[in-house]
Image: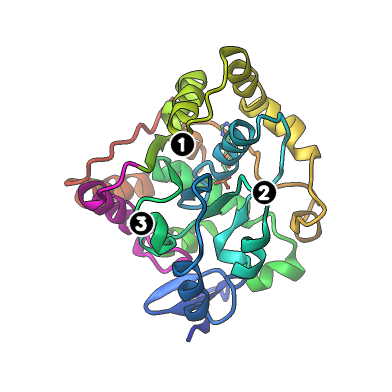
């Protein structure tokens, strides 16, 4: 069973999280964690289901929007995805096809049928300095009344927790390590790996790649339209206006807007990291990523 814990810094700032089996989860993860993980494991998967896997702030909404457009053939901004993490499985079971889910959990926590090769998985990864920057700024946008249950922590404290993995969904480095293992061991061909920085460089190429991976057979004109609608500028402008009623964002953010589309750039971390933090980060990165099959660009 999960326990609710406060991870505090010496100024009294804290993140409230659920902790289960040595891992940290956000407080709105369903129930006692244990039962929900078991329900996800046993979940019934359809051939045209897509599961988008990301460490937080790595481009979840971006890929979700592209995949939804390709799957449905409709140019509609659908807001935020249904997360496996925050919806009970009975609700997920009732959703019409094609279903596009997201999760911040690692591949190991997907339904058993997915791990056996059913449905499709799209995983997107982003350089961790921009991930951290995006996460910290995002955290500050929560309304104070609601934030207490989620996050309230300074840049320095969050940096410490992020680096040593005392954070929801764990350390980014452990997350990447788990994917290296999947790359080595997973036998199915139902995973598409994407890198945020590469998508920024050539979005059309990646939209085409996704279309081919999903088997959605779109024509070039449609792929061009999806590419255009999913540029940062268009998503920041149009998708932000398109809240679905079920979305909680409006209620819980301090300026009542969707806090997702901030800058969408590579290298914004340079405006926030101190020289010392950057040196420390590089050292840890070199050590933790030395055997990884993933490489990242930290500049645009
Ligand atoms: P920044 O805070 O650096 O701007 P997630 O959806 O996983 O929460 O990720 C949010 C991050 O993805 C934000 O990063 C957001 O701006 C960026 N993002 C969203 N849509 C994007 C797009 N179309 N192109 C590039 N980046 C995008």
- Write the residue at 67% across / 56% down: 95
Identify the mark nearer the N-term, 2 or 3.
2
Task: Magenta stretch: give its range.
Answer: 162-189
Q: Is residue 230 magenta?
A: no
Query: Residue 144 occupies which quadrant of the picture?
Result: bottom right
Q: Secondary structure at mark 2?
A: loop
Dots 2 and 3: beta carbons under 8 Å? no
Toward the viewer: 47 or 248? Answer: 47
Q: Nearer the viewer, mark 2 or mark 3?
A: 3
Disc number placed over residue 115 in the picture, else none: 3
Q: Position of residue 19 (x, y in %)?
A: 46, 78
Point 67% across, 24% down: residue: 229
Residue appearing at x 20%, y 48% in the figure: 184
Label 1 vs label 2, nearer the camera: 2
Q: Provide the residue designation for mark 1.
A: 270
| Rendering coords of residue 265 (x, y %) | 53, 31
Please name the residue that numbered disc 2 is placed on: 80
Q: Are marks 3 and 1 in contact (CB under 8 Å)?
A: no
The answer for how far apart the CA atoms under marks 3 and 1 are is 38 Å
Q: Is residue 185 magenta-colored?
A: yes
């Amino acid at each position: 069973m999960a326990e609710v814990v406060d991870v505090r810094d010496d100024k009294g700032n804290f993140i409230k999280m659920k902790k289960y089996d040595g891992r940290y989860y956000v407080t709105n993860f369903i129930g006692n964690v244990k039962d929900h993980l078991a329900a996800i494991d046993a979940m019934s998967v359809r051939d045209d289901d897509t599961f988008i896997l990301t460490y937080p702030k790595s481009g979840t909404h971006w890929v979700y929007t592209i995949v939804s457009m390709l799957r449905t053939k409709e140019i509609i901004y659908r807001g935020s995805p249904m997360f496996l993490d925050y919806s009970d499985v009975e609700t997920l079971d009732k959703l019409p096809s094609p279903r596009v889910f997201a999760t911040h959990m690692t591949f190991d926590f997907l339904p058993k049928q997915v791990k056996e090769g059913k449905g499709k998985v799209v995983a997107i990864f982003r350089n961790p300095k921009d991930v951290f920057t995006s996460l910290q700024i995002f955290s500050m946008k929560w309304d104070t009344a609601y934030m207490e249950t989620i996050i309230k922590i300074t840049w320095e404290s969050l940096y410490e927790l992020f680096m040593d993995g005392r954070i929801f969904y764990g350390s980014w480095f452990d997350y990447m390590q788990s994917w290296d293992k999947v790359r080595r061991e997973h036998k199915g061909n139902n995973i598409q790996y994407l890198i945020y920085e590469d998508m920024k460089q050539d979005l059309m190429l990646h939209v085409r790649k996704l279309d081919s991976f999903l088997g959605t057979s779109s024509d070039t004109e449609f792929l061009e339209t999806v590419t255009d609608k999913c540029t940062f500028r268009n998503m920041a402008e149009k998708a932000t206006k398109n809240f679905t009623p079920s979305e909680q964002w409006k209620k819980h953010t301090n300026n009542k807007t969707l806090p997702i589309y901030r800058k969408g750039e590579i290298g914004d971390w340079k405006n926030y990291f101190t020289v010392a933090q950057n040196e420390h980060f590089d050292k840890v990165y070199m050590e933790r990523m030395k055997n990884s099959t993933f490489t990242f660009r930290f500049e645009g």
